Image: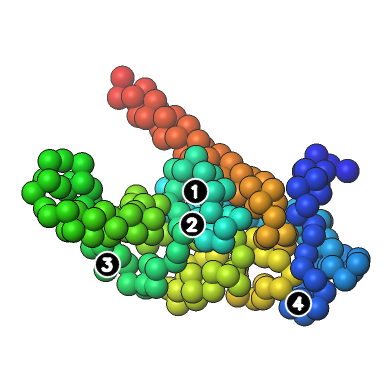
């Protein structure tokens, strides 16, 4: 058993949903049924992971933007942590309708968030009444929760990495409308046809989500490092040519 397979099994990535809740389109990714639960074929998980890693690494080496999305309770922390680690934007609290299809409006709301921070972090806040101060604080908290992860997203991303496309159906639908690629951790109750690169696996367990997000973030970092090395070599080559 390879180290990766062992790691996946230990994290419970192979546990699907109750057989009664399955989507028949997931049949090719299911290994067996045990105690009313579908067991996912780990070989299919590995295949999906390798494809996704190669693709994300290639994108990152070209300087592309990859948006991580996972708003369910079990995914929020891992999505924020791993996307920050690989320097990519994320949505882990609530998907705001139009995040992609109405990007200009979302960008303008980021301007409002920065304006509120300016008020909150200076003496300016004291010039408002107590009632207004608490209204501004409430507005700031809500906007921070929804928008903080996409501050660095200065353009539409080239790809979305999604935990549970069924839960994130709005994000998937906006990506499809704009022709943006999707990589997704997808459980036995999802429709694999709606995403470009499905990674069949448990999308409810924190350990499973953490492991998959970590592997994908590592792929992004590998792509970025490759680009940095190539750029350094190109610069050194140019210096030698000029000498």
Q: Which residue does the image show at 73% across and 60% down from the upper left?
A: 201
In space, the residues marked 2 and 1 are separated at their CA atoms by 7 Å
Q: Is residue 77 in sight in this rendering?
A: yes
Q: Which residue is mark 2?
A: 92
Closest to the camera, between mark 3 and mark 2, is 2
Q: Which residue is mark 4?
A: 21
Element assignment for label 1:
helix
Q: Residues within 10 Å of mark 1 (few under 14, many from 20)?
A: many
- Decide which of tag 2 and tag 1 comes sooner along the chain: 1
Q: Which residue is mark 3?
A: 104
Q: Residues within 10 Å of mark 2 (few under 14, many from 20)?
A: many
Of 60 and 30, which appears nearest the observer? 30
Where does the image place residue 30, in percent across and percent down from the top left? 83, 68
The quarter holding residue 137 reads bottom left
- Decide which of tag 3 and tag 2 comes sooner along the chain: 2
Tell me the tag on residue 80: 1
Marks 4/3 in contact by CB < 8 Å: the verdict is no
Of 127 and 203, which appears nearest the observer? 127
- Decide which of tag 4 and tag 3 comes sooner along the chain: 4
Of 119 and 4, which appears nearest the observer? 119
């Amino acid at each position: 058993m390879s180290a990766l397979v062992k790691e996946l099994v230990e994290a419970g990535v192979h546990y699907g949903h109750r057989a009664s809740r399955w989507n028949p389109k997931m049949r090719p990714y299911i290994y067996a049924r045990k105690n009313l639960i579908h067991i996912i074929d780990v070989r299919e998980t590995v295949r999906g992971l390798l494809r996704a890693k190669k693709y994300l690494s290639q994108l990152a080496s070209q300087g592309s933007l990859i948006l991580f999305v996972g708003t369910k309770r079990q995914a929020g922390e891992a999505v924020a942590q791993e996307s920050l680690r690989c320097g990519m934007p994320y949505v882990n609290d609530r998907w705001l309708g139009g995040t992609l299809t109405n990007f200009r409006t979302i960008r303008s709301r980021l301007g409002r968030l920065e304006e509120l921070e300016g008020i909150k972090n200076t003496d300016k806040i004291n010039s408002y009444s107590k009632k207004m101060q608490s209204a501004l604080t409430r507005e700031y908290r809500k906007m921070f929760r929804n928008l903080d992860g996409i501050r660095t997203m200065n353009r539409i991303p080239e790809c979305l990495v999604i935990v549970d496309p069924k839960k994130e159906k709005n994000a998937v639908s906006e990506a499809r409308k704009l022709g943006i690629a999707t990589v997704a951790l997808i459980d036995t109750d999802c429709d694999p046809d709606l995403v470009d690169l499905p990674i069949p696996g448990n999308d409810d367990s924190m350990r499973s989500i953490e492991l998959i997000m970590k592997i994908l973030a590592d792929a992004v970092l590998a792509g970025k490092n490759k680009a940095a090395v190539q750029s350094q070599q190109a610069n050194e080559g140019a210096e030698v040519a000029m000498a």
